[in-house]
Amino acid sequence: MRPGTPLTLETFLDIVHPGDRKFVENTWRQALQGGPYDIEHRIVVSGVVKWVKERAEIEFDLQDRPVSALGTVQDITERKEAENRIRYLAYYDSLTGLPNRQSFMERLERELGRAKHQGYRLGVLFLDLDGFKSINDTLGHNVGDLILQWAAERMKYGIRPSDVLSRPGQDEEPEPEADLARLGGDEFTVLLPRIQQPEDALVVAHRVRDLMHRPFVIEGKELVLTASIGIAIFPDDGQDGADLLKNADTAMYHAKDEGRDNCQFYSASLTTRAMQRMSMETNLRLALDRREFSLHYQPQVDATDGRIHALEALIRWRHPQLGTIPPADFIPLAEEIGLIIPIGEWVLRTACADAATWRREDRPPVRVAVNLSPLQFKDPNLVKVVLGILHESGLPADLLELEITEGALMEDTDRTLATLDALNQAGVHIALDDFGTGYSSLSYLKRMPLSRLKVDRSFVRELPEASEDEAIVRAIIAMAGSLNFRVTAEGVETPNQAEHLLRLGCDSLQGYHFCTPRQPEEIPGLLDRIWVTQQPGDQTA
Ligand code: C2E
Ligand code: CA
Ligand code: CA
């Protein structure tokens, strides 16, 4: 064939197998060694693509250069198409066009390997339509098939990647596709190849379940179908694909037992946890609008004159059913779902407005201290927001102190410094909260325009007995002195602790021994109070 054409790898490639270079290169290498070679490839014959099997031999010229290939070509189109059909049947479900069990298991094992390697969680949902058998029995298999196809379409829609699963700041990589498969009958599975937490799988499961609720219309009659969904999570519920699928199946039966039309995790504790978390998340999203937050204020008492020099604003969340939820239980969730930004802004605005109403000419000014989450500190709008709120409340910048943690400072030094400088220039004070629990170095702190270190409660708790704690507090005070920062001790609960901390040289004290956090209405009554901070016989008194 093709007599007289000078042959090269490129022309060979063009002729036989565009798109599969490696395969062609191998055949070419073999062909160059002389002797017959076989290759199957596509050609276009009068506009129709045909598969051919070519058995040929390369002919060489006198200088041993390949010049042409000579052989026979056989049309194998029918055989190829049959093979493709078989491959399709082996991997796909012909009714819905979805991947079948075999192909699902292969993808599951592949994704499990990746999840193990990269330390991700992975979710397997097992879905079973409720009461499908009776549809088949009463309406016939044709209707049953149609419903399975419709259900599959809805599920596909329900598992699309969406903003539900990508949480701000955590996941820069695009989300891998979820995979829907039909195992057979009315059983479907969904693979969620990369999730942050079990609740993410529940979100998808609920979405699919809710989509099923919409009626199917068959011959003018509405038919409502529900699904029971079981969820297994890697690594919590199993290490390999077979186990995960089996456990998701078990969980699905559990969902049926619970009255169908619901979703269950394989492990019961995950179900409760996820439910609590989801309802907490829903409630938290509504809390601002429903005005469920309030602020309490805790005095910081000046060591020299026993007066309140600052009030720390501490957020409180009161939910009508759940009761009072402490900040330690909802701030981390608010940070995770990005709600800390609006919540933090509300705290700032409220604290500044309250502080502005407490000012009086005849009394030394009292500062308000506001806790900032590291996420707020990283927010490029922070300085603008703070200055805007100060302006609108009429509170002088000098009466606002922002409490940030060491963790917030450690990231991205240049940006941190720029933010701190801008706030400092405006007159706002910065305190380093929970000090001593992080890893700030002296050289690092030296560059920061800070006003105050707040000695973490853990170093105060066991004073005066614990000598290591005392040594740490002593070191913090010495360091703060040399850097010109003031020092406040937190969590002072006993007179003994207070006395000891004063002797070590703390500038101010905060804790239940002096005053618990109080509602704003109580604050004006506290502002003229003077606490005993000097020891009897102390010459400076
Ligand atoms: P924090 O900034 O270290 O606040 C001090 C915590 O210690 C407060 O707990 C306070 O009620 C408690 N406390 C005060 N005196 C004593 C004492 O003598 N003994 C003991 N055992 N505890 C004392 P709270 O109000 O539950 O707040 C916990 C944490 O939640 C705060 O720790 C702070 O990190 C965070 N937080 C509170 N309000 C806000 C806020 O508005 N925004 C942000 N981002 N975080 C906040
Ligand atoms: Ca604080
Ligand atoms: Ca603290």
Image (cartoon, rainbow, N blue to C red):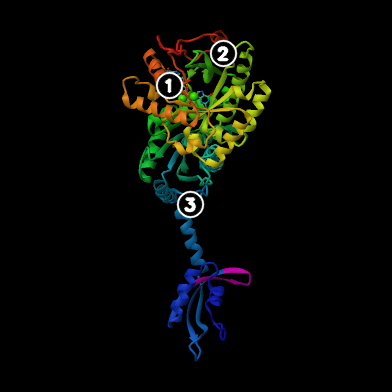
Q: Amino acid at mark 2?
A: Pro
Q: Residues within 10 Å of mark 1 (few under 14, many from 20)?
A: some
**Mark 2 and mark 3: Cα distance apart in space:** 66 Å
The x and y percentages for residue 388 are 66, 28
Q: Is residue 325 above or below residue 104?
A: above
Q: Amino acid at mark 1?
A: Gly
The x and y percentages for residue 462 are 34, 21
Q: Which residue is mark 1?
A: 505
Q: Residues within 10 Å of mark 2 (few under 14, many from 20)?
A: some
What residue lies at 68% left-to-right and 23% top-to-bottom?
392
* Disc 2 versus disc 1: nearer the observer: 1
Numbered circle sitting on residue 152? none
Looking at this view, name the residue that lies furthest to the bottom: 62
Which one is earlier in the sequence, the residue at label 2 or at label 1?
1
Q: Amino acid at mark 3?
A: Tyr
137 falls in the magenta region:
no
Which one is earlier in the sequence, the residue at label 1 or at label 3?
3
Q: Which residue is mark 3?
A: 92
Looking at this view, name the residue that lies furthest to the front: 539
Q: Is residue 414 above or below residue 271?
A: below
Label 1, secondary structure: give it: loop
Q: Which segment did they paint magenta?
A: 40-49
